[in-house]
Amino acid sequence: ILNVEQSPQSLHVQEGDSTNFTCSFPSSNFYALHWYRWETAKSPEALFVMTLNGDEKKKGRISATLNTKEGYSYLYIKGSQPEDSATYLCAPQTGANNLFFGTGTRLTVIP
Amino acid sequence: DSGVTQTPKHLITATGQRVTLRCSPRSGDLSVYWYQQSLDQGLQFLIQYYNGEERAKGNILERFSAQQFPDLHSELNLSSLELGDSALYFCASSRDTGESTFGSGTRLTVV
C-alpha cells in the first residue's frame, strides 16, 4: 500500500484562471506516475503516464511535470474552462504492478 | 465505450447476502484490476489479476474474493454483505500493467 497525497482536496477557480495541484508519493521503487481525470457519473479517464525524472507531458491546456527523486508531480491547467470541472487523480505505480490512487483534487470551474 | 464492460450496472441486495460482479476487459488486455469507491473515499485498490493469476492484493476484505477466467473476464465475489460494503466497484484493464482503462462501474447498495 502506497501513501499518496494530493493537494488541495478541492479547488474552485474562475473561468479563465490557471491553476495547479500536487501529487506526492514515496520515491522508492518508482516505476511510473499516472494522472486520471474523473468526471461525475463517468469512469476515470487516463490523461498522462510519466516515467522519467523531469518528464513533462502536455495535452491541450493541461500539462504535468514529474520529480521522481523527491516524489512529486504537478498538474497544471491553463485558462480553466467549465468543462475542466472534474476530480483529478494521480496514481503512482511501483515495479510493474498495480496503481495506488490518491483521493484526488476536485476542481470546480465557475463560469 | 471504453471497451471494459462491467455488469450489472446497479445492484441492490440485503445484508448477509452474496453477490458477483463481472468484468470483461478490453480486447488484448491481460491485467484486470478491481477498485472500490465508497462515499467520500478515493479509489481503493482491491486486487489485480494478470493472465489468470493473482498479481497483487490491496485492501480486500476476507469476505471478498476474485478470479480471472481463461477467457480473461473476471468476477469479484462479495459475501456476507454489510451496509458498509455499499460502494461503486470499478474494474480496469491494461495491456502490459501500464495505463489502465476503466469500466463504468457497478453501484452496489446493501440494505
Image (cartoon, rainbow, N blue to C red):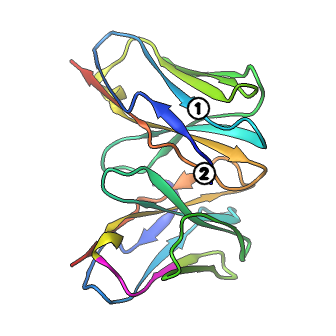
Magenta span: B76-82
- Residue B94 x %, y %: 65, 56
Callout 1 touching callout 2 (CB < 8 Å): no
Q: Position of residue A2 (x, y in %)?
A: 62, 48
Is residue A60 in view from this perspective? no
Q: CA distance from mark 1 to mark 2?
A: 20 Å
In the image, residue A53 above or below residue B73: above
Where B59 falls versus A92 (above or below)? Answer: below
The residue at 73%/35% (across/down) is: A27
Chain under numbered label 2: B
Q: Is residue B41 left or right of residue A82?
A: right
In this rendered view, identify the residue nearer to me: B78 or A40.
B78
Question: Regarding mark 1 in the picture, which secondary structure is present there?
Answer: strand
Which quarter of the figure has residue B33?
bottom right
- Residue appearing at x 52%, y 25% in the figure: A22
In depth, the one of B53 and B60 nearer the eye is B60
Q: Position of residue A5 (x, y in %)?
A: 52, 36
- Taking the image as shown, residue A56 lies to the left or right of residue B84, namely right
The quarter of the rendered structure image containing the C terminus of chain B is bottom left
Residue receiving disc 1? A24
Residue at horizontal 32%, vertical 70%?
A: B84
Place residue A15 in its image quadrant. Answer: top left
Question: In the rendered image, which residue does mark 2 sit on?
Answer: B100
Q: From the viewer's perspective, is residue A42 above or below residue A110?
A: below
- SS at badge 2: loop
In the image, residue A27 above or below residue A75: below
Residue B80 part of the magenta segment? yes
| Identity, as a three-letter code, of the amino acid under mark 1 | Ser
Residue A64 visible to an observer of this rendering: yes
Count residues near mark 2 (Cα–Cα under 10 Å), then give few for <14, some for 14-19, many for 20+.
many
- Does residue A105 belong to the magenta stretch? no
